[in-house]
Amino acid sequence: MQDNKIQDLLTAQGDRELITVQPDATVFEAVTRMVENNVGSVLVLENGRVCGIMSERDYLRFVTVQGRTARDTPVHELMTRKVIYITPEVTLPEVMVIMTKERIRHVPVMAGQKLLGIVSIGDVVKQMSQDQTAHIQVLEEYISDAYPGPAVDATSG
């Protein structure tokens, strides 16, 4: 079985709106965008380029622990600046390894300087589960002789 690539996942997702904010947006604005779109992170773009990412975890660590308020704190003060990204050619198992090793749940997909999308650990797990279910179904059909194709009489000949 060949592993699907991130490009396959992006294609299956279709045209999803990328949820982004500017670095000078307030944390409140960023969290509001995340809640409205039911996502766990927002990409921070400056002049159309990724300069950071802010996740729910960033919010909890910085604002709550330090007693800051979301309405007074700009995103650039708490965003993760070292953004780990992947390319469309990365396989689903490879991105799982990256996310686990780096302890991240969201990763942008880039082709050169072009932002293609963002995938979450949930997106990857769901797609891998669907792929595995389909693979198992094909194997079960093959084993039970229900696999598509003409039956062959092994006794003749």
Image: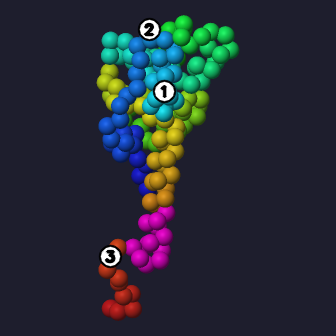
Judged from the image, the secondary structure of the residue bearing numbered disc 3 is loop
Identity of the residue drawn at 36% across and 45% down? 12
Would you say residue 21 sits in the magenta stretch? no
State the extent of the magenta-drawn residues as a range: 136-147
Which residue is denoted by mark 1 in the rendering?
34
Which residue is denoted by mark 2 in the rendering?
24
Q: Mark 1 or mark 3, which is nearer to you?
A: 1
Q: Quadrant of residue 87?
A: top left
Q: Please give the label number shown on residue 149.
A: 3
Report the predominant secondary structure element of the magenta stretch. Answer: helix
Q: Amino acid at mark 1?
A: Met
Q: Is residue 41 visible?
A: yes
Q: Amino acid at mark 2?
A: Asp
Question: What separation in Å lies between label 1 and label 2 (alpha carbons)?
Answer: 16 Å
Question: What separation in Å lies between label 1 and label 3 (alpha carbons)?
Answer: 49 Å
Q: Is residue 90 above or below residue 112?
A: below
CB atoms of marks 3 and 2 within 8 Å: no
Identity of the residue drawn at 62% across and 14% down? 62
| Mark sitting earlier along the chain (1/3) | 1
The N terminus, quarter of image = bottom left
Q: Is residue 1 above or below residue 18?
A: below
